[in-house]
Image (cartoon, grey):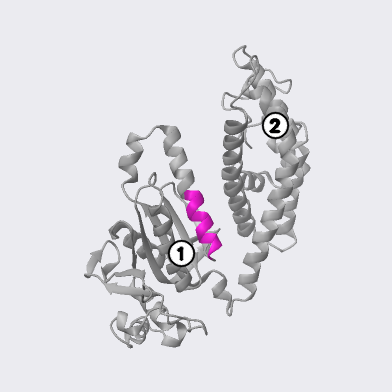
């Protein structure tokens, strides 16, 4: 399980065996008690025995949740015992296999660790800047956490239930079982051009503000237009959509929105359409790799897509056949992929020719062979 301090174990009375930092460590221990709502009582062995869970399985659960080994320190609470018992109970009842329970623990631990880190960094940075003389950040943190904790807990549960409802809806509507983990999606990578060079010139605070602006702008736009953000990687964001036209609209909107902000470098986007495997909230497969490769060769302020994506846009009426190689593009690409053209999205009643496609030079792409990208742009309305 996780130690509350990076400087080493802290005794139950809050002392650290030294004088330096004793006050802050005491406050940190009090914060731990406040957040966990329980005192330390158990060693890992005692907690596993109290939960009636084999020590080996308990260790696997704790490591999956992101908690390091702590030997036999008495640092666990009744809450740790209850959580361990519940997770093991799901396995014993047959609701989850042991491997599935490990995945649940790992996905939850990774997600919440990032969330908790972001929240505390943000709150403590922005809400404790004007600390009164004689008070440390540790002094201010306790009342701050005491006020925020119940509100953040309720909000977290609300958002989780909302997200779970949305994902469950997609799963139950899947035509086949394999569609729950593998399906045809439009995958987009948006990448800031020249970010590495820029990061060397910026101060840390300026760099943090740039990344935050980029992530916030992109995330809001992607979600607002019906896409799903998979992950952000500082200067890059990965998103997906079931509808290629929606993904295309998002890509062009991202280019346009960020072009209006002089503080953000130029953006480039690469997209591919095809079979994608989903695991633990992430996506994998050749389609994802192709989208990433297309991003790396895309010009700045431009969007490149693959042939399958181009065919899908033609099939659903988002581009006119004349913009591609003619009416046979969708059929030709579908035949090459070994699937009927009917497997591509069908034009909706309000489908219009919203985009232009321009074929680019074929080029070899590392690990994927010869690829012919298409340059995506908006179709300007006639004056």
Mainly helix, strand or loop, the magenta region?
helix
Residue 154 colored in magenta in the image:
no
Q: Residue at x 41, y 75 (%)?
A: 354
Image height of 304 relative to 356, above or below: above
Question: Which residue is the site of mark 2?
Answer: 144
Residue pictured at 35% horizontal, 65% vertical? 290
The local secondary structure at tag 2 comes to: helix
Residue 98 percent across, percent down from the top left? 64, 57
Upstream in sequence: badge 1 or badge 2: 2
Location of residue 277 in the rendering, given as x and y in whole percent from the top left corner = 48, 67
Secondary structure beneath label 1: helix
- Please report contact status of discs 1 and 2: CB closer than 8 Å, yes or no: no
Report if residue 217 lies within the magenta region.
Answer: yes
For residue 61, side relative to residue 367 (left or right): right
Is 268 rendered above or below residue 55? Answer: below
In depth, the one of 98 and 118 nearer the eye is 118
Residue situated furthest front in the rendering: 383
Give the numbered dot on residue 362. none
Q: Is residue 97 visible?
A: no
Q: Nearer the viewer, residue 139 or 225?
A: 225
* Residue 139 in view: yes
Of residues 334 and 321, which is closer to you in this image?
Answer: 321
Please provide the residue range marked out in magenta: 215-225
Q: Report whether 264 appears left or right of 228.
A: left
**CA–CA distance in space, label 1 to label 2:** 38 Å
Q: Quadrant of residue 267?
A: bottom left
- Decide if residue 372 is on the left or right side of residue 52: left
From the top left corner, tell me how far across and down residue 307 is, in percent.
33, 75
- Tell me residue 41's x, y (percent): 76, 32
Q: Residues within 10 Å of mark 2 (few under 14, many from 20)?
A: some
Disc assigned to residue 250: 1
Q: Single out the mark in the foreground, 1 or 2.
A: 1
């Amino acid at each position: 399980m996780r130690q509350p301090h990076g400087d080493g174990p802290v005794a139950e009375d809050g002392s650290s065996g030294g004088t330096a930092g004793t006050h802050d460590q005491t406050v940190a221990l009090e914060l731990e008690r406040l957040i966990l709502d329980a005192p330390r009582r158990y060693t890992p062995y005692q907690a596993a025995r109290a939960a009636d869970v084999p020590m080996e399985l308990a260790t696997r659960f704790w490591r999956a949740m992101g908690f390091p080994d702590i030997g036999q320190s008495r640092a666990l609470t009744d809450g740790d015992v209850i959580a361990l018992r519940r997770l093991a109970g799901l396995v014993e009842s047959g609701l989850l296999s042991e491997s599935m329970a490990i995945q649940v623990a790992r996905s939850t631990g990774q997600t919440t660790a990032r969330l908790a880190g972001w929240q505390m960094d943000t709150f403590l940075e922005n809400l404790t800047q004007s600390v009164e003389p004689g008070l440390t950040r540790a002094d201010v943190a306790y009342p701050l956490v005491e006020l925020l904790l119940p509100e953040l807990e309720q909000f977290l549960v609300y958002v989780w239930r909302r997200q779970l409802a949305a994902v469950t809806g997609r799963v139950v509507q899947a035509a086949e079982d394999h569609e729950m983990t593998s399906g045809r999606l439009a995958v987009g990578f948006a990448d800031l051009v020249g970010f590495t060079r820029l990061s060397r010139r910026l101060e840390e605070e300026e760099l943090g503000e740039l990344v935050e602006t980029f992530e916030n702008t992109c995330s809001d736009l992607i979600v607002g237009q019906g896409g799903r953000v998979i992950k952000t990687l500082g200067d890059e964001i990965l998103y997906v959509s079931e509808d290629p036209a929606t993904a295309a609209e998002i890509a062009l909107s991202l280019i346009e929105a960020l072009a209006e902000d002089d503080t953000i470098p130029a953006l480039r986007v690469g997209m591919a359409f095809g079979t994608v495997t989903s695991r633990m909230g992430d996506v994998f497969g050749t389609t994802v790799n192709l989208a990433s490769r297309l991003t790396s060769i895309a010009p700045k302020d431009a969007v490149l897509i693959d042939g399958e994506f181009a065919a899908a846009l033609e099939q659903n009426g988002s581009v006119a056949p004349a913009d591609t190689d003619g009416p046979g593009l969708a059929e030709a690409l579908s035949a090459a992929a070994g699937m009927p053209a009917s497997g591509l999205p069908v034009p909706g009643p309000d489908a219009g020719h919203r985009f232009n496609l321009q074929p680019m030079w074929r080029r070899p792409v590392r690990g994927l062979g010869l690829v012919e990208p298409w340059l995506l742009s908006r179709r300007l309305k006639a004056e």
